[in-house]
Image (cartoon, rainbow, N blue to C red):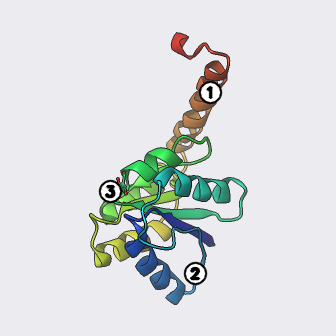
């Protein structure tokens, strides 16, 4: 499993710690930046992870900003992406079992290192339950695509 990681400056420190942690466990990690604590815009780093997942370069992604909120909102704009903002092992587990999350988002300024390691371990080692959840996650993209077509046609207010 190849995993991409991306963050803004708010997630930079935790990203580096988790990146090294995962490498020490043998995971193949693609680091998409940012590379310093200099201020950057989280959507620019969300899109890097999104592209890497959608073009199948990586099968999973881990993204971080200060809260995890801005970068997960950005990633979730794209059909095919299910970015889950997780803050404990239960949200991480359920986001895999029920939502088949392909991106894990965390708040670099809110989550301690040991908790982040636990979240990542659970998230990487939990399978999707499928079954009744399959139709629901398919519906997310069906509705998004329908909306975007209307939006591009200037009719999105009629939804
Ligand atoms: C950057 O200061 C901060 O706003 C960003 O990292 C994130 O928390 C936004 O959601």
Which residue corresponds to mark 1?
148
The mark found on residue 101 in the picture is none
Q: Is residue 97 visible?
A: no
* Residue at 56 percent of width and 17 percent of height: 156
Residue at mark 2 to residue at mark 3: CA–CA distance: 25 Å
Is 43 situated left or right of 113 in this image? right
Who comes first in sequence, dot 2 or dot 3?
A: 2
- Residue 96 screen position, x and y as percent: 47, 57
Q: Quadrant of ligand 1?
A: bottom left
The mark found on residue 67 in the picture is 3
Dot 2 lies on which element?
Answer: loop
Pick the front one: 96 or 130: 96
* Residue at 27 percent of width and 73 percent of height: 112
Which residue corresponds to mark 2?
27
Indicate which label's residue lies in the foreground, 1 or 2. 1
Would you say the residues marked 3 and 1 are in contact, meaning their CB atoms lie under 8 Å apart?
Answer: no
Residue at mark 3 to residue at mark 1: CA–CA distance: 27 Å
Task: Identify the image quadrant of residue 45.
Answer: bottom right
Q: Residues within 10 Å of mark 1 (few under 14, many from 20)?
A: some
């Amino acid at each position: 499993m190849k995993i991409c990681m991306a963050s803004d400056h708010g997630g930079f420190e935790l990203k580096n710690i988790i990146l090294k942690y995962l490498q020490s466990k043998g995971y193949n990690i693609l680091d998409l930046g940012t590379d310093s604590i200099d201020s950057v815009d989280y959507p620019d780093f969300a899109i890097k992870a999104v592209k890497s997942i959608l073009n199948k370069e990586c099968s999973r992604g881990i993204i971080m900003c200060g809260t995890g909120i801005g970068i997960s909102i950005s990633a979730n704009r794209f059909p095919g992406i299910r970015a889950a903002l997780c803050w404990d092992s239960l949200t991480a587990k359920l986001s895999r079992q029920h939502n088949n999350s392909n991106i894990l988002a965390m708040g670099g300024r809110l989550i301690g290192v040991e908790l982040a390691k636990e979240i990542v371990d659970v998230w990487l080692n939990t399978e999707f339950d499928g079954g009744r959840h399959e139709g629901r996650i398919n519906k997310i993209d069906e509705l998004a695509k329908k909306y975007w077509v209307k939006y591009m046609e200037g009719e999105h207010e009629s939804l």
